[in-house]
Structures are given as structure tokens and as C-alpha cells.
Amino acid sequence: MDYVAFWRFSTNDGLYNPALMLDYPSVNNERFIANQIGAIAGYEINKFISIELESNIIFPGAFLKQSNQGDPLYHFVFTTATNSFLQYSQIRTTSILLLII
């Protein structure tokens, strides 16, 4: 279980998605972005295969609320990893971001 509080360093900048595209431009002077609570659960099926599920809920702060995103955000990530006999690792991740309106 973890908790994170997100703040903007500069009020001249916005929020970017993982592809570094601007999702929320700077439209206000608020610094507080959001609170996030999350949990991760994992299971090792055997010494070669493991799975992991991560879930987060993000409660918007003043910046997101004034950027027309006042609803909680739900984020789920399912990860599988395999290791072969030659120590070659392969990791697959599926990420889902849900906007609940």
C-alpha cells in the first residue's frame, strides 16, 4: 500500500501523459495536483513466471479540479514476466486508466 501527493513545481507548466503529450495545460495558478493511494499484489507461479496487479485511485486536487477534471481517476496495471533458462527476461504490461464520470 502506498500514498503519494502530487504538486506542480512551476505554475507555468501543465501535466503530461506517458507519451509526453500535454494533457492538462497551465490554466490556473494552483500547485496541488492530486492525492494517490495505491496497492500492488504479486504472485510467483514458478521460478520462471510471475504476475503482478497494481491498482491506484487518484483524488484530484485544486489544479485538476480547475482544469475540469474533478472526478477520481482509477488506474489498473497487470504485468506478467517470464525468465528463460538463459536469464533472458521478458516483461509485458497492460495499463488501463478509467475516468469515472
Image (cartoon, helix red, strand yellow):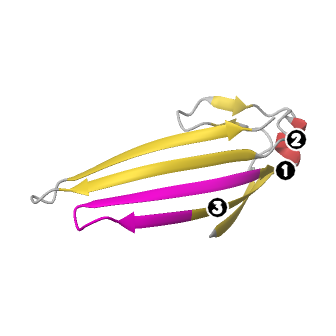
Q: Which residue is mark 2?
A: 65
Q: Nearer the viewer, residue 22 or 87?
A: 87
- Could you classify mark 2 by the number of other residues whose Cα lies within 10 Å: few (under 14), some (14-19), or many (20 or more)? some
Amino acid tagged 3: Gly
| Above or below 25: residue 2 | below
Secondary structure category for the residue under label 3: strand
Q: Amino acid at mark 1?
A: Gly
Q: How many marks?
A: 3
Magenta stretch contains residue 43: yes
Task: Verify CB contact (< 8 Å) between mark 2 and mark 3.
Answer: no
Bin the neighbour count of mark 1 within 10 Å (Cα to Cα): few under 14, some 14-19, many 20 and up: many
Give the left or right position of residue 78, taking residue 88 as reference.
right
Q: Are marks 1 and 2 in contact (CB under 8 Å)?
A: yes
Q: Give the x, y percent position of residue 83.
A: 21, 58
Residue beneath the point at 54% across and 56% down: 54
**Residue 45 drawn at (x, y percent):** 31, 64
Decide which of 40, 3 is in the foreground and name it: 40
Q: Residue at x 62, y 70 (%)?
A: 1
- The type of residue carrying mark 2 is Lys
Decide: is 97 above or below 54: above
Distance between mark 2 and mark 3 Cα atoms:
21 Å
| Of callouts 3 and 1, the N-terminal one | 3
Residue underneath mark 1:
61
Residues shaded magenta = 40-58
Do the residues bearing badges 3 and 1 touch, measured as CB atoms within 8 Å? no
Residue 56 horizontal side relative to residue 78, left or right:
right
Which residue has dot 3 on it? 38
